[in-house]
Amino acid sequence: MNGEPREIIFTSGGTEAINLAIKGTAWAGKARGNRLVTSAAEHHAVLHTMRHLEKFGFEIVTLAVDRYGRVDPDQLDAAINDRTILVSLMLANNEVGTIQPMTDLVSRVRAHRSVAIHIDAVQAAPYMAIDVRDLDVDLLSIAAHKFEGPKGIGALYLRHGTVILPQIQGGTQERYRRAGTENVAAAVGMAAALDLSIVERSEVVPRLARLRDRLRDAVLAQPNVELTGHARKRLPGHLSVVARETDGAAVVMNLDLAAIACSTGSACTTGSTEPSHVLTALGYPEEEARGSIRLTLGRTTSEDEIERAAELIPQTIARLRSAAAMVATQI
């Protein structure tokens, strides 16, 4: 990531890295301000951490996003005042795959010299070049499992000179910034997996984009199915749609029986009955958000799997709609 060894803190995953970035920066800067800025479409690791800090007197500004999930640089600029400590935004959305206009956003933050910028790059790391110098960020979070590394290991990049307060007390590990014995085997596994993903990226990214587009065309051929997220500026393996007049959870269950794995939102909210907060932030009404279907491709996804999914997913949507219509006529 073009950081220095002293700028890397190993954590138990992306959630801990994000918590350390936000809480550590917030408490370190409390004497000079209390405002934290984020967006409504962030991962729950960010939003719930912000909500927690609100209980301790921090002012949380949650920016709206457009229909694609992007933050307006002008609105970000307007949200920053002389009490602002930190801006935390994601590089690419984990549900709809939209890539933020990060160069413009970071430049707005940099115009306010005392404000730190944290980037959640957990979802982006397998598919995008992550260079902390080019991004010009103070803090950046990743998690190994997103690029097929071990679960339970992540990292926080902390620009040298950026001050945080540790959130785990104990020994002197990680240069006093994160106490506890490091999981060396998992850290080595994460590094190896990240190296492999970078080496394979030039082949994997265009192949996934091509397979995703094949699946997209098949799913969108069904009436009243709309692509969510940006049509072009999105991660290559992400396909997310809203199928109106359809219960997304029912689609997921039926596809699961056919050995096709998908979800109605973030993988971290499996089992939740609430509609996706990302889709409601994008402006979808609750009843439409409940018809969301999230399909993600990985490095090992094959042509045959996509062809099978391209046949079964539209069939499943059509069948469930037909069954719902029959029930409605009988009522």
Image (cartoon, rainbow, N blue to C red):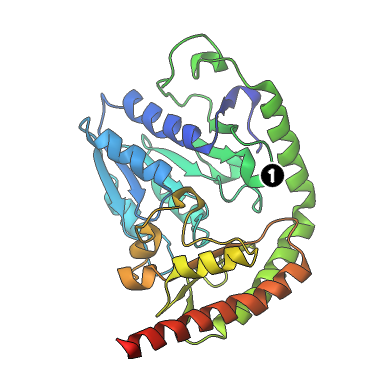
Query: Taking 159 as reference, is 125 above or below it?
Result: below
x 60%, y 32%: residue: 153
Query: Taking 90 as reference, is 58 above or below it?
Result: above
Q: Please indicate, yes or no, whether residue 313 appears anywhere in the rendered image.
A: yes
**Rendered location of residue 270, percent (x, y):** 47, 52
Query: Does residue 85 appear to the left or right of 299 in the view shown?
Result: left
Residue annotated with mark 1: 148
**Rendered location of residue 202, percent (x, y):** 77, 57
Query: Does residue 306 appear to the left or right of 132 in the view shown?
Result: right
x 55%, y 29%: residue: 12
Query: Taking 46 as reference, is 94 above or below it?
Result: below
| Nearest to the observer: residue 244 or residue 183 | 244
Q: Please indicate, yes or no, whether residue 81 appears anywhere in the rendered image.
A: no
Task: Specify the quadrant that holds the C terminus.
Answer: bottom left
**Rendered location of residue 302, percent (x, y):** 77, 64
Mark 1 Cα within 10 Å, few/some/many (few <14, many 20+)? some
Q: Quadrant of residue 74?
A: bottom left
x 56%, y 17%: residue: 174
**Rendered location of residue 100, percent (x, y):** 49, 57
| Nearest to the observer: residue 82 or residue 13 | 13
